[in-house]
Image (cartoon, rainbow, N blue to C red):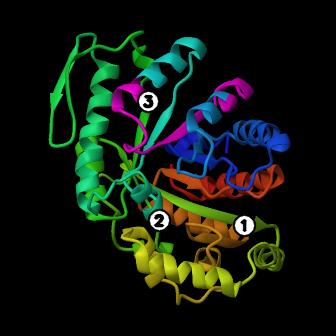
Amino acid sequence: MATSTPDHGLKIFSTCPTSLVAQPETCFRQLEEMARCSEDAGCEGILVFTDNAQLDPWLVSQIIIEATDRLCPLVAIQPVYMHPYSVAKMITSLAFLYGRRLYLNMVAGGFKNDLAALNDLTPHDDRYVRLTEYTTIIRNLLQSADPVSFEGRYYKVTNLKLTPPLPANLMPGLLVSGSSEAGMQAARQLGATAVEYPKPPVEYAAVSPANDAASNGIRIGIIARPKEAEAWTVARTRYPEDRKGQLTHQLAMKVSDSSWHRQLSELGNARSGEENPYWLVPFQNYKAICPFLVGSYDRVADEVARYVDVGYRTFILDVPASTVEMEHIGTVFERAVARCPA
């Protein structure tokens, strides 16, 4: 990945191990190892989760920064957790102390029980209106040397000034979930990368994913090995079908208003196997929140190259099972880029 990324403008993000099941005595070391491994593989950054069950994403991001030389934390930001001024202050403080750039993964939704526990009952599309206002204030604070004033439906600030100022070259990149029309609209308004949970590559054969395709990204898991059969053995061993997980998934479908959850569930009957690397079993069994591509290096590289060919330039990987898994994924991206026209 390190040699391929500049050729096609690809930005590849790995994902931090979830702290939900982490042990205190090993969590710090695991975060450092995954961060270093992601940097060695040539990733642009690494996604840091946020929800009621996770460690604070800013503290996790500081560990990542201290463990690496250039890897950018992709910090998930949910408006219900922090005022936009606090987010801007964290960004400029980390830039001042470490001279490092961040990316922001702007999150409008989350687990419904988490949001309800925080007394947030905002309807789905209105959450994206709120997210747009929220992100606009953060961006204005980071970009302006003058005090910032803003008044919208959800936020109002008056003559708010940020110190220390953020160097222009450390302005964070913006990503927004784009699986719904409201999400796509928010991404367009903010000039952000719209991140989707993709359909099988063949379904994009005749269409570009958006008017500005290069601004789109996808979230995907990858399990690849030199031989097809080996990859499927690893995949099915790691993610066996589980009745309890299937019931949990079905319950989540009933209470979720997430567009991506519904869209992936509608794709759930797609056949997988050597003739179809697109695999939804981890999603259907509540073990992952995105589709997977499974197969030989060359077969999966062909699928990734198809996504690149229709315009996707940002890839957020599901949590790699190990540092060794990152090496297999790196091989896939090297071969995928070799297949794409310059």
292 or 241, which lies in front?
241
Please name the amino acid that badge 2 sits on.
Tyr
211 or 104, which lies in front?
104
Instruction: Say above or below: 240 vs 11.
Output: below
Magenta stretch, residue numbers: 63-88
Q: Is residue 77 magenta?
A: yes
Query: What is the spatial separation of the Cα atoms under label 3 and label 1, in whole angstroms?
Result: 30 Å
Q: Secondary structure at mark 3?
A: loop
**Residue located at (33% from left, 69% from top):** 207
- Pointer 3 or 2: first along the chain: 3
Instruction: Say above or below: 153 vs 117.
Output: above
Q: Determine the image quadrant of residue 3.
A: top right
Q: Secondary structure at mark 2?
A: loop
Q: Is residue 280 magenta?
A: no
Residue 297 in sight here: no
Contact, CB < 8 Å: mark 3 with mark 2? no
Please name the amino acid that badge 3 sits on.
Pro
**Residue located at (49% from left, 63% from top):** 307
Please name the amino acid that badge 1 sits on.
Ile
How many neighbours does mark 1 have within 10 angstroms: few (below 14), some (14-19), or many (20 or more)? many
- Pointer 3 or 1: first along the chain: 3
Query: What is the spatial separation of the Cα atoms under label 1 and label 2, in whole angstroms?
Result: 17 Å
Marker disc for residue 223: 1
| Spot occupied by residue 98 in the image (x, y as percentages of width and height) | 60, 16
Residue beneath label 2, please? 197
